[in-house]
Structures are given as C-alpha cells and as structure tokens.
Amino acid sequence: MRFEWPVALLALLALPLAAVAYAAVERRRARFALRFTNVDLLLELMPTPPPAWRRFAPAAVFLLALALAVVALARPHVVRSEPRPQATVVLVIDTSGSMVAGDVQPTRLGAAQEAVRRFVRRLPRHFQVGIVAFSSGPRVLVPITDDHEVAQQGLERLTAFGGTAIGDAIRRAVELLRPGGTDRRSSSSSVSPSLQAFPPSAIVVLSDGSQNRGRLPALEGAALAKRRGIPVFTVALGTAGGTLRVSVAGTAERLPVPPDPGTLRQIAERTGGRFYAAGSSDRLNAVYERLASRLSLRRTEREATYAFLGASSVLLVASGVLSALWLPRLP
C-alpha cells in the first residue's frame, strides 16, 4: 500500500492518547458516583449492570472509525494483480550446436521445446505469440500470431547448429514487436481491433551459452529493448559441468559448454525483466510455467480512499447504535 499524503498518518498517534483519556474519565465518573450519590436509590433504579466490556466497546468502535478516517485522509493506493486484457510475447530460443548437450534430459533443445510448448498452452488465448530461433544468426520461426496451435507446431522445426548470437536475436525480436511490423499474421481475417493495436509486449530469451557470433553485442541488444520499453526475461539453460562430444582429428573429445548466467542476468536487469536459471528439464518447465503466470497478470494501482471513508462511516454509525443499546442510562 502506498500513501499520497503519508504525513497525515501522524494523527494516528493521538488515538492511543484518546483511549487513555476515555478510560480515565470512566474511572473518575465511577468514583464521583460512589462519593456523591445515593447508591441504594441507584441500585433500585438501574437494571442489572452490563458486562464491563460493553462500556468500552462503543468507544473502541468509534476510535477504529477515526483511525480509518485518518488513513483515508492520507490518500491510500493499493496494488493488486489482475489478468491482462491482451499482450504480445516473442519467444527467443537458442538453437546453437551446444543445445544438443545431454546434461538436461533428453537434450537441452528437447527440454526447451517441451517447456516452450507448455508455456504457449498456458498463455491466455487472446495473447499473441512469435518465435525467433537463433544460432550464428536469428531467424523468424513463427511470425507474431494469435493462433497458438501454429506457434506450437513451429517448435517442431528447431534444429541445433552453429554459434550463439544473442544480441542479434534480441534485435530481431524487437523488430517483430515494433508498431507497423510486417511479420504478423492472424488465424482469421476477422481479427478484433484490439489485437491490431499492438498491446504491451515482452521478450523471453532462452540460451545455453555465451555470445560468440553476431554483429550486435548482447548488452547492446538489451539497450535497444530498453529504449523501446520492452522487458526481456532470460533463462540460462544447462549446468556448469555440461559438455558436448565433438570429433577433433578423428578423436572424440568432450568440449565444455557451460551457460552464461552473468550476461543473461544483466540483460534482464537492464530491461526490467527477470532472470531464471534452469539446470534440469523439471526446473525449466517450472520456470516457463511461472513466466506464463507472470506475463498473464499485470499489477495495477488504485486509490482506496473512498473504501476507507465508507468503512469509517459504517463504524461511526455502529458506535452510535452500540452506545444507545449498551451504555447504562437512568430511566
């Protein structure tokens, strides 16, 4: 919760003092009655005394009403999550030669295909999806579409070869998301105007290694996305001990292919996204499920002043009713 005028909350400090003063007055009133009134006459006139807590309940409700009124004066704002009406997500998937490493079962590429497939299935149907595969260079695998079946089918065409050009891949994803981009298609000719309005977008990059190809450095690609206001979420796939079997001069050797979490973390931090590390297929599936939930919701801030004022008014009325019903009176 955020307050527009937090200094107003200082008035809450006066409420405990008011409670102490009320209790003191009640005790003094009781002593005065015992000292200066005809007790026998009062006992005959008064009904059975109510429980002690009833004497203080109306005052407690009144003080709570004042507290809510003070909070309302501070102009509170609450943040809550609600479903996004629409969004566009571009999935950027590393298909370099190291993606055939088997430290993530069945292979890094196989695990990525399954995780992304689940991700697309979990997205709301009104979201648009595009897929960019990259190795030594990027290529658009699935243009931005609202047909999630087409996006899932496009994953079957992923093959691993070449190097890793992360920066160029991010730039290609940004180009897909630019207003007026041509790499878009719909499952039908009757697409709603809202889907054609290029709604909020995000990029999800999965990579298992450091950049060793391409023209644009990875962090410059992140800077480009940041300038366009597009958050980039990154996933580092693989383990530090991952290796790839290669043949050198007719001899089979194991080539280390560790992921590069440092660069991917910087990309996410600089663009307002989030970094994830996945060293197993189960962890990768969990990451993409979390991403699907995260991207499907948005955090909105709304002023709650009138809600607190309403609650304060109800409690003020309640304190008056309780006072009339419970506080003792002479007939």
Image (tube, rainbow, N blue to C red):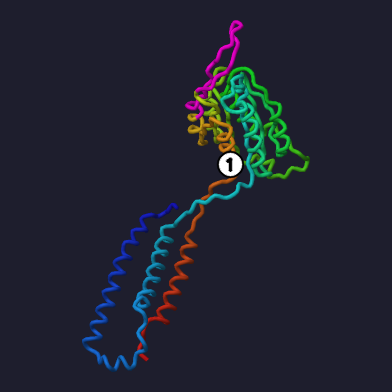
Q: Pinpoint residue 217: horizontal percent, then vertical percent.
A: 53, 21
Magenta segment includes 319 = no
Asked if residue 97 can be seen in this view, the reply is yes
**Could you tell me which residue is drawn at 56 percent across and 37 percent down?**
287
Q: Pinpoint residue 224: horizontal percent, then vertical percent.
A: 55, 28
Please tell me whether residue 251 is drawn above or below residue 217 in the rendered image.
above
Magenta segment includes 255 = yes
Residue that badge 1 annotates: 295
Residue at the extreme right = 189
Q: Pinpoint residue 280: horizontal percent, then vertical percent.
A: 56, 31
The kind of residue tagged 1 is: Leu
The C terminus lies in which quarter of the figure? bottom left
Q: Which residues are magenta?
A: 241-264
Label 1: few (<14), some (14–19) or many (≥20) C-alpha neighbours in 10 Å: some
Q: Which image quarter: residue 101?
A: top right
Q: Pinpoint residue 262: horizontal percent, then vertical percent.
A: 47, 26
User: For this view, does 125 lie left or right of residue 79?
Assistant: right
Q: Which image quarter: residue 10?
A: bottom left
Residue at the extreme top = 249
**Could you tell me which residue is drawn at 41 percent across and 58 percent down?**
74
Q: Nearer the viewer, residue 280 or 310?
A: 280
Q: Which image quarter: residue 143?
A: top right
User: For this view, does 95 lie left or right of residue 185?
Assistant: left
Q: Nearer the viewer, residue 317 or 246?
A: 246
User: For this view, does 197 lie left or right of residue 293?
Assistant: right
